[in-house]
Amino acid sequence: MQLDPVILFFLFGLAAGLLRSELKLPAALYDSLSIVLLLAIGLKGGEGLAQQALLPLLPQIGAVIVLCLIQTLLAFAILRGPGRFERADAAATAAHYGSVSVATFAVAVAWLAARGIAFEPQMAILLAIMEVPAILLGIILARGIRRETDWGKLGHEAFLGKGVTLLLGGMLIGWIAGPEGLAPIKGVFFDLFKGVLALFLLEMGLIVSRQMVELKRSGPFLIAFGLGMPLCSALLGLGVGTLLGFSTGGLTLLATLAASASYIAVPAAMRLAVPEAKPAISLAASLGVTFPFNILAGIPLYHWLASTVNRG
Amino acid sequence: MPIHTETRTLLTIVTEGVVENLLLADLDRLGVRGYTITNARGSGAHGLRDANWDAATNIRVEIICARAQAENLIEFLREHYFANYAMVTFLHEVEVLRPEKF
């Protein structure tokens, strides 16, 4: 099996980090790369949406929200039951797993593109939608519905975080401009996508290497959870995608989204809304185990499952 | 001509970047008239915080005010932030020009 160069960049960063190399990318670069990736995904989705009716998307949006809520509840039950996590830690970690990782999605998009496999343009919109519900449910699981919780502020935080804002903004621009309007900026956002992703994954490798060190402290249960939870979620995602009649490419992406765990939007929101939860636990699982598992083994596996389902 | 200065208290807060907006809203509510924020890196009870990505950023907030207000602020921080967030606070006596600003 040939590895994509973007994956090699990730492994390079991971190795450099584990060997305690001096290599360090400026924080501003990481920020800029993530902005380009989010906008590119948004633009691409918007461009595709401009060519189709939007109304049929509503049931799909409803379905993925339910999918996210089920994933969050399942993760919470596993962490509370067999995992014996404290309530706040279980709720915060479950929220990471009910939400999505844009980086994982980007790798899956590149993986499909390299093999010439098409997918539905609305995947970008589903990606943006799937960031949010788990955050709100995670907060409810941690604290119950209390009057003193400032839902206005939390909603603002969840819906207008950096990721969702850039995705929706890019989508709107892509939708208004259409393929012809986007042609002049195609060079930066579409042609450079893989190069930007490669650099971004180099930094991700460095970040993940630090979480792997953290993982030694948290023990085997968290590692098992970080591997098992994405597999369960991917199956749920495949089920929902099949009900919605997605193509093999779309099924692969929905399974990947379901399997992925957030490491940007959710940690920030949980840090503020459930401060007693220990961020080291959720990040060790989502970054130290689930992210590398998904991009190295998960995506090809989900694609294989998706093509099996669609053939049968 | 000798420079006229007055003594005020400099309150320095080193904490997680993620709480910035929350903290600033609280400071504003508690009547803080001005502050300076810088990005920071460091290591302590919460491990290495090297500002390499979102969850590992630190900020340093500096506030110059009267001693009594600085003590009020610390009391508030102790109650609302110390238990759950990485936070270091300390006080300094400083000489300021234009004391009416603080």
Image (spheres, helix red, strand yellow):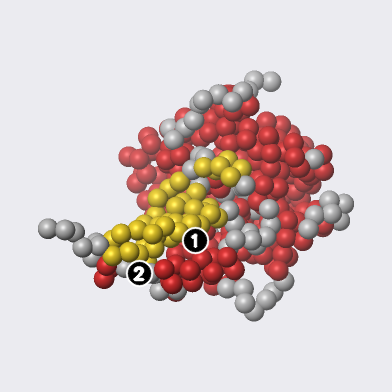
A106 relative to A233 in the view: left or right? left
Quadrant in which residue A12 is drawn: top right
**Kind of residue at badge 1:** Leu
The image position of residue A11, as x and y in percent, is: 61, 26
Q: CA distance from mark 1 to mark 2?
A: 28 Å
Quadrant in the picture for residue A208: top right
The mark found on residue A92 in the picture is none
In the picture, the quarter occupied by the N terminus of chain B is: bottom left
Q: Is residue A299 above or below residue B76?
A: above
In the picture as drawn, the residue positioned furthest to the left comes out as B1
Query: What is the chain identity of the residue bearing mark 2?
Result: B
| Residue shown at 67% from the left, 60% from the top | A276
Helix, strand or loop at disc 1? loop
Q: Which residue type carries mark 2? A: Arg
In the picture, which quadrant includes the C terminus of chain B? bottom left
Q: Is residue A311 above or below residue A65?
A: above
Residue A10 visible within the image: no
Residue neighbourhood size for the residue with mark 1, other residues' Cα within 10 Å, grouped as few (<14), some (14–19), many (≥20): some
Residue topped by disc 1: A160
Q: Which residue is mark 2?
A: B33
Q: Quadrant of residue A61?
A: bottom right
Q: Position of residue A158 (x, y in %)?
A: 56, 61
Q: Residue A51 versus residue B78: which sits nearer the camera?
A: B78
